[in-house]
Every structure is written in C-alpha cells, then in structure tokens.
Amino acid sequence: MNVIDRFHRAFDSTLGILFIGLVLVLVLLGIAYWVMMWRQRRRDVLAYLHQGFYRKAESLATSFHFIGIHKADFFGRQSPVLFTDRAYGLCTIPSPDVVDEDVCDRFRDFSRTLATQRSLVFAPYRWQYDEEMLVVVQGNLLQNDGCPLSPLQRYLLDKRLGKAYTEEILLEVARGMAALHRLKTERGEPLYHGFLLPRSLFIDFDVNRSISEIVIGDAGMAYALGPEKVYQRISLLRAGKLPIEKFTGYELLEQIGMLAPEQKDSNRLQEVSQQSDFYAFGALAVVMFAREGFRDYRSIDWSAVPVKWRSFLQGCLEDDISCRPKNFLELEDWLTDPDLALTLRFRDNNCEDDSDDDDFPEVSLDSLVGVLQRVQQGKGLSLRNSAGKDKFGQCLEAGLKALKMSRWSSARKYLTKAIDIRPDDADAHVSLAIACYELGDLGSAELHYEKARKTDPNVAKCFREHIAFRV
C-alpha cells in the first residue's frame, strides 16, 4: 500500500473528515483575519507606516488607555481613549513626517494661551505631550457613554437644522472665534483656528431638542503645523497620496474648498492669518443657510441667506484679505433684531466679557449725539428707514449707525465704501476720521479730517469737537 492509498483510507474515516473540516475552518479564519487586517490597515495606515513611532507614542499614555478603533485623519492618527476617572477623550498623534521641534513649540504656545481663556466653545486639551513628538487628547468630543458627538456634517446631510438653530450655532461659533482672535502667544503671535470646517464642529441636543453643546475641535492643529505643511497635506489629499482613512478622505475633499483661497495657493501662504477664519466662517454659514455644498463665491444662492447676514458673509468671502471683516463681533450689529434675539445664546451670566477694548471703549458716544446728528443732517439721512437710498446713502447711514453704537471697525468699513462711491463727501470723511481716531489710526484720522475741512470747514469741526470730549 503506497502513501497515496494510506491518505485515501485516512480521509475516508471519521477522523479524516474532522481533520478536513478543521483545515477548512482554519483557512476561512485566516481569510477573515486577513480581510479585517486589510480593512484596519486602510483605516490606521499611519500605524503601519510608522510602527515604531506609534508604539513609542502609545507608551506615553499612563493616565488613560486606548479603546475602540484607530483611524488615519488629516492631522494624524485619531483614537478614542478612556481616562482613569472614566472620562473619554479623542487622541490625535500626528505622524513623524509632520511633527518637528517648531510644530511642538507652536502647539505648546497655542495651548498655553488658549488655556487662559475660559468658557470657550473649543474642545479643551485634557492631556498633551509636546517634546520630540506631539500627542494630544481633546475633551468634550465624546459623550459620557463614549459615543462621539454628532458632527455638523451629519445634520447638514439630513437637513434637520432650521433657521433658528443655524443662527444660534453660527453666533456661538462667532463668539468663540472673536475670543480666540483676541489672544496672542508670549511671542506676540495672534491665534487663529485655520481649519473651521463642518467636520470640526460638533453639536448635541438635550431631551427638549434644544442645543445643549456646541464644540469646535482641532483648535491649534493647523496653527501648529503652519500654512506650508497644511498646504502640503491638502495637495497630497487632492492627489490621492495622503495616508488617510478612505471615508474621511472623501469627506475632506468635499469640504476643503471652504478654506480660504490663500491656504490653497502656494504663492499666498504668507497671507494665512486670522482673516482666513473669516472666509471659512462665511463658507460655513452659506452652507448651513443654503443647505448645499460650497464650491465658490459665484455659485452661492444668496436668496437662501437671510438679508441681515448677507453683508457680513459677503465680506467674509472676499478674496482679498484686506476686504474681509476685522472682528467677529461686528455680527453684534444684528443682535438687536428681536427675531434673532429669541435664538441667541451669545452671552450668558457665566461667560466672560468678550468685548474688544478697541471696539468697546469705556467712554461712550452718548455725549456726542448732537455732534453725530449734525453730521447726519448733512445728508438728511434717517436711521429708521433706508428705503429709496442709493448705495452711497446706505453705506453712510450704516457707518453713522455703527459710530453711534461705538463699533469703530464696522463704521470704518462702511464709511470707506461710502467714500469710494463719493470721494469728496465731507460728512463721510469726517465720520471716517472719528472712526480711525478711535481705532488708534491717527494718521488716517488726520488725513480724512483735512479732506473734510477742504470741502466743508463747518462739517469738519465735528472731528475737533469729538476729540475735545476725549481729552
């Protein structure tokens, strides 16, 4: 009996059948394991590309441990974690080809500066390591049961956000961004977010279907990487060469157009600053109001955007950064609207005063009402009714209204537009001189005063009277 005959007789027995079944089970398990590893590798591709680096990063975790599934995200590998106090967090570990000493220094400066401001909508950093590598854990992005908060993108897809919710969310975001823009690092560098997209904004509702929480994630990541590295990663993403989880990559490609044009142009990276956040905010607002994706300025359906929002959002979406708003608090021009006030959570008794010293000085314009009224009478404008006025009249009226409310930045913006339309108008020049004076731009203030004096000396006296009240 040869060997082949012996195998045939063995497999014909009961033990042979069991052996064959066991081999088949092992083969199926092997295939299943390979498929699961392949899928996990696609989600956690960074860990496979830099195994030693991520093992070292994970060894730093002493007060928390990793749970759930890792995934490769835009800024690095993201993983849910559980602290010893049973609180959940979201850990981000950028890859070694992104992190260097300068990135760690910039993130450290950002996080220390942000920590001085309380009651913000930004996800706090519960834990961080920022020496030779960067490991950070954000809080407030997962609920008490470990389930993540819903990103804004999910509600936009379902189209479940009405106008009231939309305005409440946008105003809360504006409040947070205004507070962030007031901060500067120890080196004197102003802070900015740099990646304000629907995927970075999370909301939660209570049992009464009221918004209970609004959280902005990834604060400090784009700032730490800097414009060049963010641009490089955007370029790799568009080319399909960025190591990132597949679904996350598709989602980012749909939203990346909402970033400011200077962030996506290698020749304009030096322009990336706080002004870039205004563009992203404008695109975010348009997407929320119009309930459709953002492609470019020309494709926007402005009829879907409430009239009282259009001027600010159109300014945000200017290609020229110098034409964009200078302060998110300019949105407060609309807060006196009764309909908008019903949905507002912009301020509460537990929040710090986010007003900017330049825009809200201690000395009000109450004593100067007569002065401003005389300026206003030059054109016979009425703040109660703008119907029938030309573009110049509307801009001048808006500027005068902003002056009365001590909103100097907003006043300068409108009055500058008025002067562009009618360069020789004395009322516009003297009003702009007052706004520039309050903003500390004394050179421009004197320049516009002189132009007003040459055209109408009587109107120009208003500027000197204004200064007299301030001395």
Image: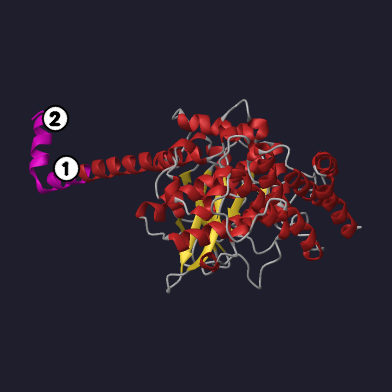
* Residue at which label 1 appears: 20
Magenta stretch bounds:
1-23
Q: Is residue 276 left or right of residue 152?
A: right
Magenta span dominant secondary structure:
helix
Identify the image quadrant of the C terminus: bottom right
Return the x and y of residue 36 as percentages of the image width and height: 34, 44
Query: Is residue 10 left or right of 59 when viewed as pictured?
Result: left
Tag 2: amino acid: Val
Residue 3 is a magenta residue: yes
Residue neighbourhood size for the residue with mark 2, other residues' Cα within 10 Å, grouped as few (<14), some (14–19), many (≥20)? few
Residue drawn at the location 67% of the way across and 57% of the way down: 401
Q: CA distance from mark 1 to mark 2?
A: 18 Å
Image quarter (top left, top right, bottom left or bottom right) of the N terminus: top left
x and y percentages locating residue 172 in the rendered image: 57, 60
| Residue type, mark 1 in image | Ile
- List x then y, in percent, for residue 253: 44, 37
Q: Nearer the viewer, residue 172 or 441?
A: 441
Earlier-in-chain disc, 1 versus 2 = 2
**Residue 174 in sight:** yes
- Residue tagged 2: 3
